[in-house]
Structure formats: structure tokens, C-alpha cells
Amino acid sequence: MIRVRFVSIPVSDQDRALKFYTEKLGFQVVTDQPFGNGQRWIELQPPGADTLVVLFTPPGHEHLIGKFQNVAFTCDDVEGTYRDLASRGVEFVQPARRAEWGGVEAIFKDPDGNTFVLAAPARE
């Protein structure tokens, strides 16, 4: 059985990103160790998730920093999570709203401008 081990988020400043993902989003540090070329290998775990988030930019991939990321986060209550994260200073480019596909979604940015969807599936 194939599963997703981690997704990588390209960042320009690992210290600033680490602070955002742990203090603002509540992710837990799993690994933080030197990885060469002045970077670290930083693995974070969102609460209750099996898939890890890695704050690392491979050489030659710097152009991906600050773009829409093909990573969607989920939670049980998008509206409540939106309010909570916004109160912590997380920048949203789209507030929580009912999506055309039936679920609820919001879109937020990290300090580098990487953009992510926060969504919950439609309830029956």
C-alpha cells in the first residue's frame, strides 16, 4: 500500500517558517537537523495527521517559493479554524465560505506567500 510520507513546502527563511507553522498553525516538530548547504531538514506534523510537512527548498527550486502550493489542509470546522487562525495573525486571501463543490474552504498564506487551501468535505 502506497501512502504519502511528507509534502515539502519551499521556504526562504526556515527559522521564520518554523515559527509560523508551529506557533500559528500548531504543528509539532518531528525532526530538525542540518541537511547541508546551510539548510536544515525540518519535518512537522499537523495535529492528528500521518503525513508530515517538510520546510525545505531543494537547490534550483527557489522559484517555487511564494506560489500556490498543491497542498490542501483539512479540519472538522473550517469556519471556526478560520476565525482562530485569523485571530493569531494568519493572513487569509479568502475567508471561509461554501465552495461550489459543496464543502467549505478558506485560503491562507504563510510568511513567504505560499498559498494553501483549508477545506472540509460537504456534509450529507
Image: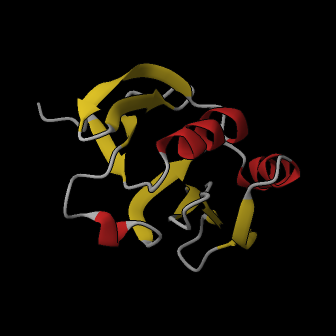
Tell me which corner region of the image, top left, top right, bottom left or bottom right, holds residue 1: top left
Q: Is residue 54 above or below residue 73?
A: above
The one nearer the camera, 36 or 75, is 36
Say how the picture is coloured. Answer: secondary structure
Query: x and y percent of residue 93 in the render?
Result: 69, 74
Q: Where is residue 9 drawn, in percent x and y?
A: 39, 52
Q: Residue furthest front?
A: 38
Identified at 58% across, 80% down, the residue is 100
Viewer-nearest residue: 3 or 71? 71
The residue most toward the right is 87
Q: Is residue 76 left or right of residue 40?
A: right
Quarter of the image that includes the C terminus? bottom right
From the viewer's perspective, is residue 28 above or below residue 98? above
Identify the residue at horizontal 74%, vertical 55% (top origin). 90
- Please, is residue 19 above or below residue 113 in the view? above
Give the residue drawn at x 61%, y 63%.
109
